[in-house]
């Protein structure tokens, strides 16, 4: 591991835990959004990486949605937070149990606004109840429908069906987002070269009705020409 990679890891750990602690004492959604945005921007600034939004006009300024996004790197959540910076959209992230218990991300994930997904449980009723509670309180829901990071060379891997249930149960319109740039490779390059400036392209698509009967993954692929 290079000196720059070690330095970035220490800084990321400091940011994640310091903001995680601050978020613990904030309940207002817009205040949480502001803190999450500051955290995300500082993480990306440290990597000399900026976010370019495609189809900015398609982003709703407010309201509640199920935001679905592809997932290829650990910096995807900060990238999406920055892409939504000019809106009032605040969403709880669907987070795996491993992140809740992580010594690196745990404090931040638990306090920043998230819904725990525990795949080891035989029943998912608790997860859907948490989602419903979040929506009732005024939040959107952010989810990576692939369920895990895409470590293949494919543009997308198979969507899990759970996201459709969230949309249907809560009558949430679906806002599709596609991160065009391979974020894992961006991070890898940034850690190797501290002076390299990079750009990540994030594209927003048309809203999909929660009652849509078609294959959402196929609609998503056609929308982003995948």
Image (tube, helix red, strand yellow):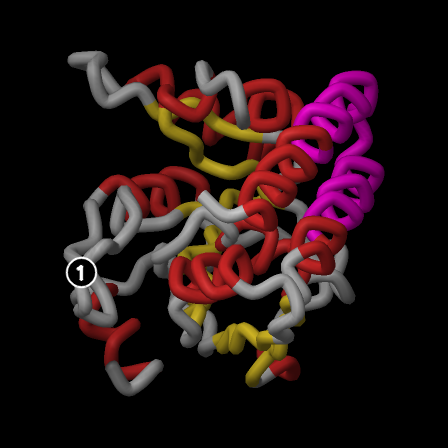
Question: 34 or 211: nearer the eye?
Answer: 34
Q: Which quarter of the rendered picture does the C terminus lie within?
A: bottom left
Which residues make up the magenta segment?
15-40
Secondary structure beneath dot 1 equals: loop
Quarter of the view holding residue 163: top left
Quarter of the view holding residue 213: bottom left
* Number of numbered discs: 1
**Majority secondary structure in the magenta region:** helix
Residue that carries the numbered disc 1 in the rendered image:
152
Question: 117 or 37: nearer the eye?
Answer: 37
Question: 191 or 84: nearer the eye?
Answer: 191
Q: Residues within 10 Å of mark 1 (few under 14, many from 20)?
A: few
Residue 220 position in % (x across, y down): 29, 72
**Residue at position x 63%, y 30% from top?**
13
Q: Is residue 54 left or right of residue 215?
A: right
Residue 223 position in % (x across, y down): 33, 82
**Residue at position x 48%, y 27% from top?**
115
Quarter of the view holding residue 41: bottom right
**Residue at position x 36%, y 60% from top?**
70
């Amino acid at each position: 591991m290079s000196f720059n990679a070690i330095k970035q890891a220490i800084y990321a750990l400091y940011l994640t835990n310091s903001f995680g602690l601050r978020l613990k004492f904030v309940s207002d959604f817009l205040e949480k959004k502001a803190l999450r945005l500051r955290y995300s921007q500082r993480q990306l600034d440290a990597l000399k990486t900026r976010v370019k939004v495609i189809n900015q006009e398609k982003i709703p300024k407010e309201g509640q949605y199920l935001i679905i996004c592809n997932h290829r790197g650990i910096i995807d959540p900060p990238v999406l937070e920055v892409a939504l910076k000019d809106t009032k959209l605040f969403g709880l992230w669907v987070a795996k149990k491993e992140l809740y218990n992580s010594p690196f991300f745990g404090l931040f994930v638990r306090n920043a606004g998230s819904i725990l997904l525990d795949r080891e449980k035989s029943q998912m009723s608790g997860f859907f109840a948490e989602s419903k509670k979040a929506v009732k309180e005024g939040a959107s829901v952010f989810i990576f429908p692939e369920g895990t990071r895409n470590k293949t060379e494919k543009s997308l891997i198979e969507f899990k069906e759970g996201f459709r249930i969230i949309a249907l149960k809560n009558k949430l319109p679906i806002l599709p987002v596609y991160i065009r740039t391979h974020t894992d490779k961006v991070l890898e390059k940034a850690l190797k070269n501290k002076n390299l400036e990079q750009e990540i392209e994030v594209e927003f698509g048309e809203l999909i009705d929660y009652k849509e009967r078609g294959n959402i993954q196929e609609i998503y692929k056609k929308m982003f020409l995948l």
